[in-house]
Amino acid sequence: MSMSDSDSSSYASDYKNFKQISRERLLHEMLRSAKTGDSKSTWKVLIMDKLTVKIMSHSCKMADITDEGVSLVEDIYKRRQPLPTMDAIYFIQPTRENIIMFLSDMSGRTPLYRKAFVFFSSSISRELVMEIKKDALVLPRIGALREMNLEYFAIDSQGFVTNNERALEELFGDEENHHKAVACLNVMAMRIATVFASLREFPTVRFRAAKTIDATTMTTFRDLIPTKLAAGVWDCITKYKKTIANFPQTETCELLIIDRTIDQIAPVIHEWTYDAMCHDLLNMDGNKYVHEVPGKDGGLPEKKEVLLEDHDPIWLELRHAHIADASERLHEKMTNFISKNKAAQIQHGSRGSGEMSTRDIQKMVQALPQYSEQIDKLSLHVEIAGKINRIIRESRLRDIGQLEQNLVFGDAGMKDVIKFLTTNEDASRENKLRLLMILAAIYPEKFEGETGLNLVKVARLTNEDMIAINNLRMLVGQPEAKKTSTGAFALKFDIKKKRAARKDRSGEEETWQLSRFYPILEELIEKINKNELSKEDYPCLNDPNPTVHGVPYAQLHQNPPAHSMRSRRTPTWARPRGSDDGYSSDSVLKHSSSDFKKMGQRIFIFIVGGATRSELRACHKLTSKLRREVILGSTSLDDPATFITKLKLLTALDDLQI
């Protein structure tokens, strides 16, 4: 079956980012296309399964859905009231169970709905299509039967996840469960491929090649995860070339598939941006933040839930700013707002205790609605930033952060870590664990045998914590600096030798303390952009078409001259300072789409085993710098606590042959 031939060309005329395209396909190509004939003015029912509800909720708000004529949203597996005068839109996975439920709804003399418009989140098998077609009663009641090929969660304007939350466990855990691992990869490959179906993009598919220690070491399933996933994605995309209308026949973008072993430090190091700090320190549920607001009529305070997402212009402006910068800018915004907004001035008594003139009162009334909304948002972020800064202060997080970064850049070693652990016994267990995990990623050999156990004892960690450290260390196989064996208790050996996991980046302006760290992903993207990524370490499944990927590469991607890359424009993640009303961040929203116009080919990176917020931030940063939209995909987006929990759930990896 081919996907609906709706105007993908309309996307090209006005460049839209990844999430905007996903949203428009769901609203316009699916919901709006069901408005046909006599049903144009009729309200409809939208029926989804558990997965498609999440897909829809990540891209669209309920108001968007109702604007397209949907009056009711239903779960396909719940008992539903018959509405025989209304049409139904089904957005479901093409599973046998869903098809059975759909046929049950629409068969018999009295179907639940007048007409059904059916949209599948991914490709449906020929067998299930025949199952539908052979039901003579249902067939005339179907208004549409199409493959949407949209089975991913758009978590950000430049990010998506495939909802394989247990990928780390299923793929990197016990290799005996081969069937589960293969099933996980198959689902992942299909969902990644639907991203390219949505965007009408045909990628060159590259992947991290399996590495073995020497010719005598057997390559394991874990080593081949990116290879196998790349093959699965390629298989789906070659089918799309034949079945999807307007799907390009030559390469239009680049995809690189890697896994979590590429960078063990990024998931556990403290990231100092506003976004990362919110999710790391505030126990948020996804993007949901709960705070107290004054009760009505002077009553008890009430709890209020807010979503920290793209619709909030302050969040959009500050999320990738360093926490110190974000706090400073919030203070400026609040000060400017109060000084320039008449209602705020009066509220804060800046006119003194004198009697207000009629003109003052009139201006206050005119300004109040705007004042109320804006002061609420500003107050919210001032409260959040204040809470984060208080946690940083009370837990002495700056000292830990400085040691973490010094370790990563080779300015500190074992001696410094041991000193910190013995002089900061009140540091939280999680922070000490994260510090040792960074140490294990840089000095894996130090955690072998008694040495590792004694380090854990000095830190006063548990056996469960030791499992997390060992599993992180063993994800990439045997340590390179292997077996320089020493005695049973050897915390002092080799402590003078230091090793750097990162090099300072030339030309990078370091504005704020603790902002040196960058994920390995950043280097990989820049190498892709320059066509300098090793073809031996990152082979390509499809040889690029020379007419598409010919030399000169820079000309093809429409990159600016090298000397002007950093000065071309201020990226949206930096600091658009000041505003006329002392508050407005609307300019960030207004220009966010125009920033993407006239860009080079998209770059897609997919990480198996969970991505981090620092990696998502790097994609935003490099989109601005390289003038190419960089889209990050992963099995999940993990905060440090979540990643550590997943590591603890793995079977002991050092028991396996690696």
Image: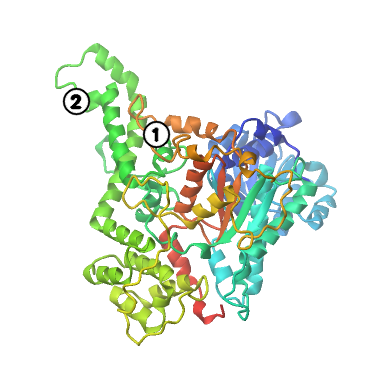
Residue 212 falls in image quadrant: bottom right
| Residue in the foreground of this view, choosing between 171 and 420 | 420
Q: Position of residue 623 (x, y in %)?
A: 52, 42
- Marks 2/1: CA distance? 30 Å
316 to 537, vertically: above or below = above
> Label 1 crowding class (10 Å Cα cut-off): few <14, some 14-19, many 20+?
some
> Label 2 crowding class (10 Å Cα cut-off): few <14, some 14-19, many 20+?
few
Q: Nearer the viewer, mark 2 or mark 1?
A: 1
Question: Could you tell me if residue 546 is visible in this image?
Answer: yes
Residue 280 falls in image quadrant: bottom left
Image position of 382 (left or right of 539): left
Q: Position of residue 393 (x, y in %)?
A: 24, 54
Q: Which residue is mark 1?
A: 576
The answer to which of marks 2 and 1 sits earlier in the sequence is: 2
212 to 240, vertically: above or below = below
Image position of 15 (left or right of 39): left
Q: Position of residue 4 (x, y in %)?
A: 75, 41
Q: How did the renderer colour the structure?
A: rainbow
Residue furthest to the bottom? 487
| Residue in the foreground of this view, choosing between 458 and 28 | 458
Q: Point out the image quarter for the C terminus.
A: bottom right
| Residue in the foreground of this view, choosing between 476 and 369 | 476
632 to 586, vertically: above or below = below
Q: SS of the residue at dot 1?
A: loop
Residue furthest to the left? 353
Residue at (47%, 69%) from the top-left corner? 647
Question: Could you tell me if residue 49 is visible in this image?
Answer: no
Q: Which residue is mark 2?
A: 349
Q: SS of the residue at dot 2?
A: loop
